[in-house]
Every structure is written in structure tokens, then in C-alpha cells.
Amino acid sequence: MLIAKNITKKFSGVTALNNICLELHPGKVNAIIGENGAGKSTLMKIFSGVHTQYEGDIIYNGNKVQFASTKDAEEAGIAIIHQELNLVPHLSITENIFLGREITNAFGILNKKNMCEQTKLLLKKVNLNLHPDTLIYKLKVGQQQLVEIAKALHTNAEVIIMDEPTSAITDKEVDNLFAIIDELTANNKTIAYISHKLNELFQKADRYTVLRDGATIGAGEMKDITHDELVEKMAGRKIMIERNTMNAASNEPLLQLKNICLQNPENSGDNVVHNVSLTLHKGEVIGVYGLMGAGRTELMETIFGLHPSLSSGELYMESKSKKFKSPADAIKAGIMLIPEDRKSQGLCLDLTVRDNICITVLDKLQQWDIFLNKRKETALSKAYIQQLSIKTASQETQVRNLSGGNQQKIVLAKWLAKTPKVLLLDEPTRGIDVGAKSEIYKLIKEMAAKGLGVIVVSSEIPEILALANRVLVMCEGKLTADMPVAEATESNMLTYALHRN
Amino acid sequence: MLAISSSYSLNTQRLKRFQSLIALLLLCVILTVLSDKFFSSENGLNVLRQTAVNICIATGMTLVILTGGIDLSVGSILALCGAATAGLLKNGMVLPSLDIFIGFTVLGAILAAMLIGWLIGLFNGFVITKFNVPPFVATLAMLTIARGFTMLYTQGQPISNLGQQFVYIGAGSFLGIPVPVWIAALVVLIAAFITQKTKLGRYIYAIGGNETAAKFSGINVSKVKMVVYAMAGAMAAIGGIIVTSRLDSAQPNAGISYELDAIAAVVIGGTSLSGGRGTVWGTVMGAIIIGVLNNGLVLLNVSPFWQQVVKGAVILLAVIIDKLGDKKE
């Protein structure tokens, strides 16, 4: 059993963890729940030897331990699967799994065959149907995560900490993961499971611990608590997600796609997006559901002008034919994309809140077309910080220091500032807490009410049902369903997502 | 937590800005104690005069490094543009096929040289963005190419005796301050203005901080990069003009390894080699630290061989201190 006893952790005088207590029981799935900023990540970093300075005790199997490094923790049998994946992009799956633990012969030469065989077995365990020599950068986020899990399996860790393991993977992959977790707990391993998806926790977790503002709010058996009670403990307020019942505001077409195709860059005979046609009306929210690899992200990227040389088909914006050669062209036409990965695609983490918000509209913030007018910049970002209730110490704060939900709001703000006509949102609430999530939902609906056309790509069915007027489902690059939200159900969406010819 | 963490990062940033200034002052105090010749306005101006060229080049280098790139060709561009200024001034330009001769005034020759520097830099940027060649490789190639053209143009011989008027640029003084120092100050001011106050500057930081996010934000990344390399080229050309004027002679071997001094100044000034973080002011401090160090070591009669060792050690030290300051927790 791994126990945290009265842990207090301060960052340059600020208390991140305040006298926190936590027990992780072996053979159980221990859910750790809390909004972003509650202290989950900090605590996990102490368990895994990232933070070495703290007050209080870590007791592991009855002995007090103090890890001096991540390697220390790893050798003690604690593995962590981070939300931000830690793989080397240009090494293969095998090389990543065996990184630092390479198998060599007596002369120090790598035994590739052996490692490759072991990797094959591990990949089989996580149901990842890829060759062990595949380079990591060619993998989608979801697949990379499975590699991380395989890596943890390989180290024979006793305690496996999973930080938002299902935030980027499809339901099918979630089933995979749960099967793996069952096997691990059956072998008396300890699972610490951090997630915002409460349904999942009720399905999988045995115990819960709720953290809020760096303190332990409650702990117990999962079966003794209800969904609403848990949410209330997390947020201190009630949040409901309801199905969208509104119809689109108009029949006026905004964006029309005809037979949009996108070639697979690695195999020109293959299409990642195949003959997709759709019409987005003013004030309409279209939800696009699909499993990993269905081509949803690629479709958004194609519309946004990111693949001009590989794509074909016709695109009409307000009935005018358009051909986008770059995102700049798409933006000029009023189409904006909020990308899947806010940290690597959406934000400049080292720049300030203000600089990130203003980056798309610097043209409008200039004095005599020469230099930037700081007053205008400040006024603009102030307006959006208020409108989206972005929690930040100041406009000068580096975006790096904000929570995921607030970062995502900044990405939204920077595009709202540009007054889009069509907003493409790719996994807009991935890895952000319930409170920020419902705020973002509210915003999206408000924008649609003002006549904006919105396309939301999501792997979470409830999210699509909450937001969309119309639901599209994609499978293997093709559209397999297009229906009003009233007709959409969890089961028929999944059926279409699994649709095969 | 948010409030403190941000003010914490602000404080370290502020500290970092002063870090190189403090180092510089410390260095000056030590040298004043060790040598009675160091602390005088005459020696101070001398250091600045000698540093001016590196400041010009390093300022351009800062812009490039802020985008996450590097420019190894600036030393060669300096030589080629210096030679071009001298050659145009002395011999003009002859187009034999058209039977045309164009003579150049001092200003004309200077502008022509700056244009050449700009175009070479633009070419660097074009190769880097259009063909996705890593900046290190593209500018390494240009280092050789531009040096080769310098040799071809000068036939390996210095071009000397360029006239009183031209020599004023490198050797003259205005209001008691050497003209090269005025020029360097102007270059720095322009670059500081661009980086801190303009759209282009913001884009430079954005691209260095996260190129993908910049592209997704609709920024024309290629265009910004090309402009930045072109500016680095033009600033190297300005350095070349100063060097040529100071010597009253364009040397075909001028500027060899100047790119390294420039990179050192940028690094000592606290600019991150991975881009997105740093300032032109830091680079100026870095260049002056190197200049003071050179000057001090000469005054202390340290052998030139040891001077190199000390200079390298200081660069290392500066980066290590910088890294220590970065450590969180």
C-alpha cells in the first residue's frame, strides 16, 4: 500500500498541497478526482520522484520512503503515465519501451531480436496492432499512449499512476485499457487513476479520493457515493450537462464542402479523408464523432488549409468557391481552427496571456501601421479575460502557468478576437475540468446563437449531444451518418462509428 | 498559486535582465582594481569602438536566434559586403557587355553593400523556409559561398586607400563618441524597437516559442523568417562597412569566426538558443562583456593563448548561471 501522510508542498511560498492524505490500495483502482489545480498532478509528481522537496511522509508497504529521483521511484516499482506523453519521437516503439533498460549481450551489443519479440508481446497485451519498429512520431496520440502503457507493463511496476489516460483515446481503446487494468488489479497491482470522466470512474474505480485546492475533501468506496455527490465534492457546486434541444437558427448555408478528399501522405493510393460533403448553416453547431483514425482531425485541418497539396474537392464559403493554400487564407475567409493539442498547436507557452490573445489581430492593434499600441492590446485582452472569465493573475502572466481550462479559453479568445464566421473546434475540452468545460459549452452555444457556424470534433458522445444541432459520424475517412441530434443516441453513434462496408 | 507563480517568473525575468548588467559591472570593478589603465573614458570609448562591429552582427544574430534559427554566414557576409563597399567606391561597377560604368559615392557604396547583405540573408531565409533546410546547414553553406565570392571579387588582395570621407565612418568621432558606436546604437535601437514594439517582433517571439502555433494562428512563418535572415545579413553588412572603413582597407580574410563571437554575445546576454526567449538589450550586454574581457586581458598582459581560454570559460559560466536561474522549485 502506498500512503501519503500529511504532505505539504510549497512552490516559492505558495501552498500547492496542504496537509494532504491519500491511500492507494493494492489490487484496487484508486480514483483521484479534482478540478485542475486541485493538486493531483503535484501529488503524483511527489509519488514518482519528480518533486523531492516536501513536508510529510510517503509510506510504501509500511516503510517510509523518500525518492531522490524519478529513477528511484521507478526502481521501487512506481510508474507514471503522464497526460503529456514522454516518448522520443524519432525512436521506434521497441527503442522507447527499452529506453534505459536495453537488453545487451556480453559485449554490450544490443539484442534487437529479443527486444523486438518482447515488444510484440507487450503490444499484443495493449491490443496495438503495429510493428515494433514503427517510429513514434508516426503514431496518433491515442496509439502513443498505449505504447506508454506497454512501457509501464514492461517495467513490472507495482503501482501504476495513470493521469487522464482516456482523454485522447476512443471508446474501443478505453475498453482495451479497462481490460488491461482488470488484469493488473487481478495481479494485485495498485492503480492510481486520475480522470475527469466520472462515468468511467463509476465503471472502473473501486475507491475515490477527492482533492480540492490542495486539500483532501473526501475519500471512500466508489459504491458508497453518487455521481452528483462526487461532482459537488469536486466543484463545490452543481453542474449538469444537458442535451442540446435547439434547432439551428437559420437555413442560410455558410460553409459547403463537396467531395473533400485528403491523401495519406505515406501512401498516395489511400485517402485519410474520403469524399466528405457537408453544409454548415449560420448559427448551426455540427458535432463530428468518430473513433481514433476516423479522419476527423484531418478533415478539420484540410478545411483550415493545412494540407493544400494533398487535398482535393470543392469548398464554398458563403457560396463563393475557395481554395485555401495556408491557414492564413482560411482565416481571411473567416474560418478558424482551435486545434486538438492546445500546448503544441494553439499557444506560445512562453508568451504572456495578452500576447497570446492579441496574436491574431495585431493588424488592428497598431498605431500608424508601424508599432503596436499597448493600450489597445491591454483593452482587448482585458475584455476577453472578463468575457470568458479567464483566471489569471495578470495579463503579463506566462500562459505556461495557467491551468488547462484557462489555457483553452485563451485559445478561444484569440480566435474570437478575430471575429470568425466558422469556428472549427477539435476536442475543445480535452483534459480540462468540469467547471471550465461547462463554461466553454455555454460560450459555444452563445456564439452559435449570434450566427456563427461551429463544427465540434469530439471523442466524447455526451459532449456532442450537449453541443450539436446536427451529428455527423465518421469512420475510416468517410461520413457514415448525418442526423439531427434528436435522432442521435450513444448506441447508434457508436454503430456508425464502427460502420464497415 | 497563480498570482505568485507569475510574479515569480516576472521577478526572475527582471533579475535575468540585470544579470548580465551585474556581471558586466562586476567585471569592470575587478579590472579597475587589477589595472590602473582600465577605468578611463578613453579606454571605455576604445572598448565600445572595438565592440561596435560585434554589436551590429550580434543584434542581427539575436533576431535569428529568437526565431529558433542560427546564422553562421554573417562573418563571410561581413567580408563580402566590406569588399563590395571598397571595390564599388574605388573602382565602381563596370558592365562590359553594355559598355556601362557606374561610379559610387560613399553613401551609394554603403547602400549597395547593405542591399547585398540583405539579399544574401534573404537567400538564406528562402533556402531555409522553401526547402526546409536546417538553418545551421544552410548558413554553413553560405559561410563558404560568400567567402568564396569575396576571394573572387578581391582576387585575394586587400582593397585599400578608400578616401578620407569613407574612413570617417570607422575612425571618426561625433560629439566625442566614435562613429561606429553611434551606428551600433542605431542598429540596436531599431532592432529593439522591432522586437518590442512591432507586429514583426511579436511574430518573431511567437515563431521561436511555438512555430506550429504561429502557423495555426495564420502567421506567414516563411515570410517572417526570410525578413529576419535578411536583416541579419544587412546588419552583418553594416559591420563589414565599419571594419573596412576603420582599416581603410577591405581584407578578404575579414570577419573569420565573427559569427562565433556574435553567438557568444547572444548567449551571454541570456537569449535561449532554442528561440522565443531573450532580448536585444541582453545581447548588447553580452557583446560589451566580451569586449571588456578582451580589453582587460590585453591590459593585464595575459598571453593571447590564455585569453581564448578565459573567454571560453566565461561563455560557459554565463550559460551555467543562466541555467541555474532557470531551475524551478
Image (cartoon, coloured by chain):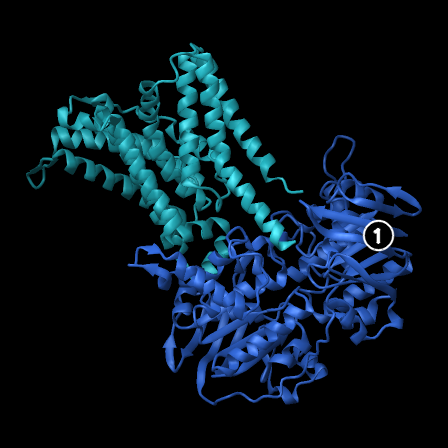
Chain colours: A blue, B cyan
Image quarter in which the C terminus of chain A is found: bottom right
Which residue sits at x=82%, y=41%? Answer: A66
All told, the count of numbered labels is 1
Read off the chain for label 1.
A
Can residue A477 be seen here? The reply is: yes
* Front-lying residue, A496 or B213: B213
- Judged from the image, the secondary structure of the residue bearing numbered disc 1 is strand
Near mark 1 (Cα within 10 A), the count class, few <14, some 14-19 or many ≥20, is: many
Query: Is B163 placed above or below A175 here?
Result: above
Residue A142 vs B222, above or below: the answer is below
- Residue A50's spot in the image, x, y percent? 73, 45
**Can you tell which quarter of the image residue B108 is in?**
top left
Up-down relation of residue B305 to residue A151 (above or below): above
Q: Nearer the viewer, residue A468 or A408?
A: A408
Horizontal side, residue B329 vs residue B33: left or right = right
Residue A422 percent coordinates (x, y) = 47, 75
What's under tag 1, amino acid-wise?
Val
Whether residue A475 is visible here, answered yes or no, is: no
Give left or right: position of A250 versus B157: right
Instruction: From the top left corner, tell me how far across and down residue B286 is, in percent.
Output: 44, 31
Q: Position of residue A399 (x, y in %)?
A: 56, 55
In the displayed structure image, the side of residue B209 where residue A322 appears, left or right: left
Q: State which quadrant residue A189 falls in.
A: bottom right
Residue corresponding to mark 1:
A159
Is A21 left or right of B270, judged from the image as shown? Answer: right
The residue sitting at 74% across, 32% down in the picture is A108
Of residues A362 and B174, the one nearer the viewer is B174
